Every structure is written in structure tokens, then in C-alpha cells.
Amino acid sequence: MKVLAINCGSSSLKFRFMELGHEKPLPNIQRCYFSGIVDRIGGKSSIRFTSEEGEITDEYAEAPDHGEAVRRLFDWMNEKGLLGRDGLQAVGHRVVHGGPLFSSPAVIGDDTLREIENLRHLAPLHNKLALAAIYAARTMLGHSVPQVAVFDTAFHHDMPDRASMYAIPLQISEKHRIRRYGFHGLAHRSMAERYAVMMTTPVGKTRLVTLQLGNGCSAAAIDRGRSVDTSMGLTPLEGLIMGTRSGDVDPSLPGFLARHEGVDVEEVEGWLNNRSGILGISGYSSDMRELLCEEARGNAKAALAVEMFCYRARKYIGAYLAVLGGADAVIFGGGIGENSPQIRAHICSGMEWCGLIIDRGRNAAVAGAQGLISAENSKIHACVITVDEEAVIGSDTMRCLSGRNQCS
């Protein structure tokens, strides 16, 4: 099946057009026609296409929003003759929040769209972007090409109540559908599945702590292929320290700041989402690469931001080792996790007590690729896995449409 995977980020849109065959331990990509990204959406946008031969084309692309980014993508595909009879057969969209309704991929029809719209209050930014992309694709393609929504929250849907519920009055939870939904599900699932293949071990026999570290960050405890706990909660704000998001704070903090700063709670939530994290601590940047450079120059605030980021991640690793009763591996993924040996070493520093020992040479050698970074005498594997969300989107889209996986 020829599937276009569309993955909306906050200011970018990644895509891959691929032909998928029958399922194997990992998505069976028989051919990748092209992949790419529309970057800096809403600003000085650009679009990059990488062909199956590896040829890269960079173009200016006016994309004030994600809908326009999708239209630009389909215009290019049409120019290349990829939308004809033997071309595109399905489109898969990553949708961040599926709420309590979606535990598996769903064919996008009018009812599905209404349900996703009704969930916007749970992820107002993220679902809005995905919906813009979906509506644009429907306008361009009509009903001739089926489309599927693949939900980030679905991987965490079956977490046990002890991990998914908040200790608030049950009737309030039920009334407002409040629970810890978790996010980055496609990334955590990708890490678990790719680790199992790398180690030639069935994913159903593994216990893993996975770390998705980028501008957004989360951790997950995965027991035999199933998420049993994760750091993000009702929204993507809870958990690890991130680029601009605070992660865990005292629940009374928004009310405290609203009263003492004379603003409403919504403005404080904006501060916690957009002005906090390593940006707020350092006062300099939300980019970990820049902070590491500043730390090397002696910038104390940058050093504090790095230390707090790593400390919080280390604390979650320890908590999830307790949840799982030990683990086979700690896995690093995402832009920071895959490309920063320094951060990986810092996070794992002092974890010899549980048998997690990093090999300095192996760690330094792995950047932008995957491989083991733990020492030979480490009781727990540490490894880097390159996250491939687009492959998961494509695979789930094919399975859903072929009926081999029950759709929501």
C-alpha cells in the first residue's frame, strides 16, 4: 500500500511517502518515494524534499499555517504525478490527543472529525494543527483517498488505574474525563519495537524505560510492550523539564502566581508552557545545544538548566525502575536523546547503584544513529534508538484499512 504519513509539530510538518508490505517485526517499508519537512510554519517557511535516491531539494514555501503546508505538499506531489491512478492510496495523520474515545487508529470520516474536534480542549494547540492538516488534505483529495488518524495517546490508553488516575474526587474525574492520558506514544512504541528487533528479543519479553528527549520530553515505563506509566498527564505539560515547558510543579503554583501577579490562570498556564523549562531557567535559549555551549563558556544559569534537566530525567528513570521491578534497558530517543552524548552521560551519571553503567567511548560514538552505549559489565542496557514516528503512522494506517487491526 502506498501511504503518505503526515506528522504535525508545533511549527513544522514532517512527511513521508512510502510503499508498505505485509507486517514484520517492524513496519515493512518496501520503498520510500520521498520524505521531507515544512519548517518554520508561520514564519520564513521552507520545504525540504529528500528523494529515494537521497537527492535533497530545498525551496521557499509560504506556509502561514499547517493547512497551507499540506496544500503545498500536495501541489508538489501533483506536479510529480504522484496523485494519479497508481499513486497515493492512503494518508495517515498523527493526532496528539485521542482522549478516552480512541484506543486504536480510526478511519477519518465526519463522525471521527467531530469527535476529534470535541477533544480540542484537552490539547488545544496540538489537535488544532492536526485538524488543519486533515481538512486541507480532504479538500485536496476529496473522498477518493482514505485517511486515518493515528493517536499519540493510544499507546498509553490501557495504563492501570493506579498510574492513569489523579487523586481527586472520582465524580469530577468522570464528569470532565480527567485522567493521565500520556503523549509521545508513537515515539515510545517505536523505541520499544526497534529495541526488540535490535536485540532479537520479542517485545513481549522486555521491560524498558524509554526517554523521548527533544523540545518536548517524556519518559515511559514499558512492560512487555505495554505502557504501564508515563510522565505526561492530562496535558503535555506534566513530567520532565522541557524546552519551554516546566514539567512537574506544585499544583498550587498557577493559583499562587495568578493571585500575586494579578493575572488570570490562563496566562500563568501560558508561562508554564511557553516561557519555562530550560528557557526559563537559563534565560537564554530553549535549545540544548546552545545551552551546552554556554555552559562550557561558564554561564552559570545555562549550567543550572542542564543540571536540572538531567536530574529530573534521572529521577524518572529511578521511579520507573521501581515500577517495573528492574529493566532490560534504558532507551534514549528524540533530538536530544539521539544526538547528545553529553546529556546521556549526565543523566546516567551515578546510576551504578542499579547496574546502569555507560561506556564513554561507545556513548561518544553514537550520534544520530542507534546502538548500545552501555558498558560490557552493565546489568542494564543503555542504548540509543532512532525514533521513526512516520513508519508507525504508515504501518498503522495500512493495518487499519486492511482490517488486520480493529479501528476505533
Image (tube, rainbow, N blue to C red):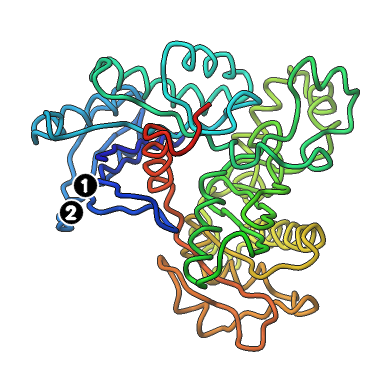
Give the residue at mark 1: 34
Q: Is residue 76 visible?
A: no
Q: With respect to residue 23, does 115 lie above or below?
A: above
Element at label 1: strand
Residue flagged by tag 2: what amino acid is it? Glu
Image position of 109 (left or right of 304):
left
Element at label 2: loop
Do the CB atoms of the residues marked 2 and 1 lie less than 8 Å apart?
Answer: yes
Q: Quadrant of residue 322?
A: bottom right
| Badge 2: residue crowd in 10 Å (few <14, some 14–19, many ≥20) | some
Q: Which mark is residue 274?
A: none
Tell me which residue sits at (79%, 28%) in the image. Answer: 254
How far is disc 2 from disc 1 in space, using C-alphas? 5 Å
Q: Is residue 121 visible?
A: yes
Give the residue at mark 2: 52
Q: Position of residue 401 (x, y in %)?
A: 38, 32
Q: Position of residue 70 (x, y in %)?
A: 29, 27
